[in-house]
Image (tube, grey):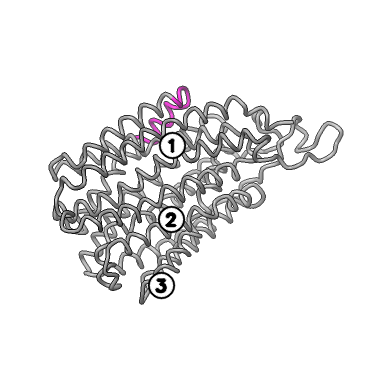
Amino acid sequence: MRPASEPGNPLPTPTHKTRTLWLVGILHAFTHVYHVALLPLYLRMRDDLHLGDVDRATALMSVMMAAYFAPSYLVGVLTDRMSRKKLLGWGLFVNAMGFVGLSFAPDYATAVVCVVVAGLGGSCFHPAATALVARMFPVGTGKALGLLGIGASVGFLIGPFLSGALADWTGNWRVPVLVLGVAGVVASGLFAWLSEESPAPAPASATSTGGRAADGKPVGRVRLFPRPMFAFVFAAMALLFCLRDFAGNGLGTLSSLFLQQAHGFSAKEAGLALSFIFLAAPIGNPLFGHLSDTARLRWLVALVAVSAALFASFPHLPAPAVKWAFAVYGFFLIATYPIVEAELMQSVPDAVRGRFFGLFITVGGLGGNAAHWAVGAWIHRLGPDASRVAAYVPVFSGLAGMMLCSLGALLCLRWFRAHRGEYLP
């Protein structure tokens, strides 16, 4: 039976929905493997490419993520107009080919081009996937996106460990990059073969006549922001959530360098420790996603507050305990992402979800992923102090404070939910 809130949009069968959800989850895993695979490889890349400073290696991550987020609004426009299946399949293929190219990069300039290609391909995933899943599951959206988040957790979990282990085993950072790139190419082909097309969304209208007004005339395309106040609240919300993303992304680069330089971890050991951030996330994502379907904003406050407290504690812990603290931290923080996505998707009609989410992650993603470069530059300025654990306390505490400040975005989320009806004529 078609939900009254999304008129004119035929929903897929339960079998199609379940299969599509898990296939998109596999793509989600690859998307995020590529986001963390370089984290344990910075020092090897610096030496092999003769970069001199580690911040040039960490800058590759920021460049890739900038390319990943910059076109997100344009991808969102495509998501609202064309096949989401094609966007997802071709996006992974281009993303993977960027990594294949990176594995053969002879110099830094070529490496920059390759990570830009990888980022552009990856940009297709989240606007298309989030809108697709929210449309298929208008009831229990938080739970569905939590299940989709398992794919991200698996990708985050295996990415740094696998790349670090292969780099230590072969003595070459290029091997794990090539292996992961080829695997992504294969996965994109399997997705194109096994997945089924999802019906394109129809324009929202006040009637259930398939996108036509009562007089039979076609209804115009729904505007992203019905009036200027929507744009203002949206900008505030995206910038505030950017603080959470800056802190969360900064943790990966910060912890990789912190563990290797202050605690003497190898690339493999650092990669394994970073993987622990996502060890419990496959449980936390669907659990908190399901719980949030009845009290979403209250759960967000609790999860972010606990995550920030754990974040600030990391440099005060003995080295053997850090990875277990990472696991607890990831259990709470990673669950905030599907919860926020569910609230975003349910705050606007299906006809604008691609653009809405695409613009949201463009703003938050570009700002949040500048953390990789910023953290690398900060550690470079430490000089010899980079080997002292105490030197890292201020940046861990500062990033934890930014995470707490992001809670102001919840007021914006509540405002959008209250004004959702203004999108419909």
Q: CA distance from mark 3 to mark 1?
A: 38 Å
On screen, residue 218 above or below 31: above
Whether pointer 3 and pointer 1 mark residues with C-beta atoms closer than 8 Å, the reply is no
User: Which mark is in front, 2 or 1?
Assistant: 2
Q: Mark 3: which secondary structure? A: helix
Residue at image x 50%, y 36%? 237
Q: Residue 163, how many percent across, how many down?
A: 29, 60
Q: Mark 1: which secondary structure? A: helix
Disc ID at residue 109? 3
The outermost residue toward the right is 215
Amino acid type, residue under disc 3 in the picture: Ala
Residue at image x 60%, y 53%? 74
Query: What is the span of residues highlighted in magenta in the rendered image?
Result: 284-297
Q: CA distance from mark 2 to mark 1?
A: 23 Å
Identify residue for label 2.
65
Q: In the rendered image, which quarter is residue 299 located in?
A: top left
